[in-house]
Image (spheres, coloured by chain):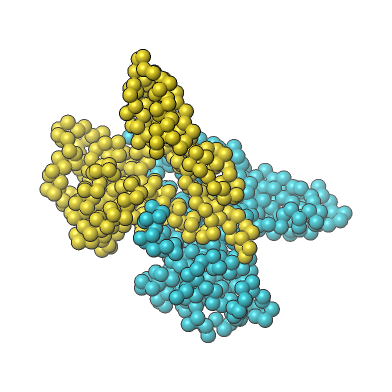
Chain colours: A cyan, B yellow
């Protein structure tokens, strides 16, 4: 019997989940829930019901795991604790500073309901977090580095769009090669914000806008750009659509550590991602963890969990015997 | 109270474990067991008892986790099932083809005794296996690649030493850059053995030996070298000791996979290690998993496990709350 997945929110992430389910033969898409008029939502997969989110409790028995595809700012802090009362749920809550609070809220719901709630699943938080944990447990005497990119930062692109005279924009976060190489050398450098990443902006300005002012406003924007070396390219709307319509991302988690009675040996553990589509990769991680949530709940587990709490074998469609034989 | 670790076998790996324990403040070295005369074994750490392996059962109450540091060929197939009857144990059994058989033997002992037995812990099998599992679960439509090196292969160095006229030798396995880059490009190439790795040999020959014959015998040796592009350098014993006395290793696990309704987006997940000391890194992984074995057994878990079965949080000295706050 397939694991029946519900998608709660059908944007980029929801479509990524729909696509990822098709790659996992032990799962099926059971339903999509939307805040829009369900009749206006067209899925890629045929013959799948689309329901309004208001009716979600009418479909409790049709869903084994509900995947929440809303945003971390306002959707998930409300939706995850609420839906965890009635479903096994997974979200990709990514406001790092608010994770302990979110965990507590969701854990309360899921412990009472008897369901499993997996939060903050994706690649950061998610796979990057796992790699920070594994590497620091293995090399206690060491130093962690996380670099992001090359990739599109939605938040920074939005910030540029709010500058007067800007029609549209795309911002890439790019790790600095010299910093990456210094870390990989084992020298365990102290790196400033400016030394780790540069920011490259592609901006479409309104006709007649003061380009020098726009460029200056971007480069001096506090929090977003002021602490970085930022370059601004003015391009046409056609160029933006042609060359910058993708949502690539990625990054690096590196730990540099020492072993030996006198700390005489250096070791570098590096994990990296190069992703053509940020939301599709995040969705793929979430779908693998949906399998884990389903299996854990079948075993009687309940409450809020993160990737830290899930034994890797739960993610795989293969049996434990197959995994030991083929992958160990 | 500290986790009391026993070391069973005091060679390179045993010394690595001794060194790693000193980096983990929740652990202490309780005793070392050796097949040699205990009076002849000098530890780095002072005031730690050294016992003969024959007396191991007299010390059951002094050890929380026994780390087995013997070899996979003849030691571990006997020792791990035997000691799992009396201790929580960990080994680094690395004969991939015999893992299912070893698992079954160890699981029988540990299930009956009520202890936890963790097998095949290290980096391959171990961290590389974990990365193969995670990446394949996330990207089901993809292809795995494992490259080893640059590093010293003990088995291949030994094979060279058996060639007539050879006094000593060191063999490095080196991944081919073109192959690595082809994999990273997302083209998912089919690679032959020869295309993936080259083998570089540093050989000290007896005076007057026929160097051309030695080189030819090495390069045409079945299984070990015949399928690879192999280079042979003749050097002096002084050069071998000066330039090739380390035991570095490392490697790469890469998965290249596609997502999207039409498989239109490529993703590369890469995990790599660059290790100054192969045994010290392996020991460091084992010691982190010793913490997991101890905690799991405290929770009432028993039987044989692998890294696939262990939730990451069990490896860390930090609490679950700290992990979520600091690492997620």
- Residue at the spot x=53%, y=85% of the render? A58
Residue A71 falls left or right of residue B15 = right
Residue A291 falls left or right of residue A195 = left
Considering depth in this image, is A30 or B188 the residue closer to the camera?
B188
- Residue at the spot x=50%, y=39% of the render? B194
Considering depth in this image, is A212 or B113 the residue closer to the camera?
B113
Looking at the rendered image, the quarter that the N terminus of chain A falls into is bottom left
Residue A156 falls left or right of residue A206 = left
Residue lying furthest top: B208
- Residue at the spot x=57%, y=74% of the render? A8
How many numbered marks are there? 0
Residue A28 falls left or right of residue B127 = right
Considering depth in this image, is B142 or A56 the residue closer to the camera?
B142
Residue lying furthest right: A208
Does A18 appear above or below B110?
below
Residue lying furthest bottom: A58
Does A255 appear above or below B39?
below
Does A260 appear above or below A62?
above
- Residue at the spot x=48%, y=41% of the render? B193
Q: x, y percentage for residue B312? A: 39, 56
Residue B299 visible to the viewer? yes
Residue A71 visible to the viewer? no
Q: x, y percentage for residue A155? A: 65, 58
Q: x, y percentage for residue B13? A: 30, 39
Q: x, y percentage for residue A88? A: 46, 73
């Amino acid at each position: 019997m397939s694991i029946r997945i519900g998608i709660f929110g059908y944007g980029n992430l929801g479509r990524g989940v729909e696509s990822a389910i098709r790659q996992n033969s032990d799962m099926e898409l059971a339903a999509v829930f939307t805040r829009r008029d369900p009749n206006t939502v067209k899925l890629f997969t045929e013959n799948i019901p689309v329901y309004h989110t208001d009716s979600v409790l009418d479909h409790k028995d049709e869903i084994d795991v509900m995947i929440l595809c809303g945003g971390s700012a306002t959707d998930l802090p409300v939706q995850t604790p609420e839906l965890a009362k009635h479903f096994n749920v997974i979200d990709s809550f990514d406001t790092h500073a608010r994770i302990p609070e979110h965990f507590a809220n969701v854990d309360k719901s899921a412990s009472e309901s008897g369901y499993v709630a997996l939060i903050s699943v994706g690649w950061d938080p998610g796979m990057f977090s796992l790699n920070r944990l594994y590497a620091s447990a293995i090399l206690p005497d060491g130093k962690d580095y996380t670099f992001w990119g090359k990739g599109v930062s939605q938040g920074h692109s939005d910030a540029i769009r709010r500058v007067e005279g800007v029609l549209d924009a795309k911002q890439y976060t790019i790790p600095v090669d010299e910093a990456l190489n210094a870390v990989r050398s084992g020298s365990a450098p102290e790196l400033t914000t400016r030394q780790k990443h540069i920011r490259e902006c592609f901006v479409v300005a309104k006709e007649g806008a003061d380009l020098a002012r726009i460029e200056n406003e971007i480069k001096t924007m506090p929090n977003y750009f002021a602490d970085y070396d930022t370059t601004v390219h003015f391009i046409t709307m056609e160029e933006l659509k042609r060359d910058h319509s993708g949502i690539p991302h990625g990054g690096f988690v590196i730990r540099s550590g020492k072993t030996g009675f006198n700390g005489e040996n250096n070791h570098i553990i590096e994990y990296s991602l190069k992703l053509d589509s940020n939301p599709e990769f995040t969705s793929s991680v979430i779908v693998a963890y949906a399998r884990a949530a389903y299996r854990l709940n079948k075993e009687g587990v309940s409450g809020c969990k993160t990737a830290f709490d899930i034994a890797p074998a739960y993610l795989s469609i293969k049996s434990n015997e197959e995994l030991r034989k083929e992958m160990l």
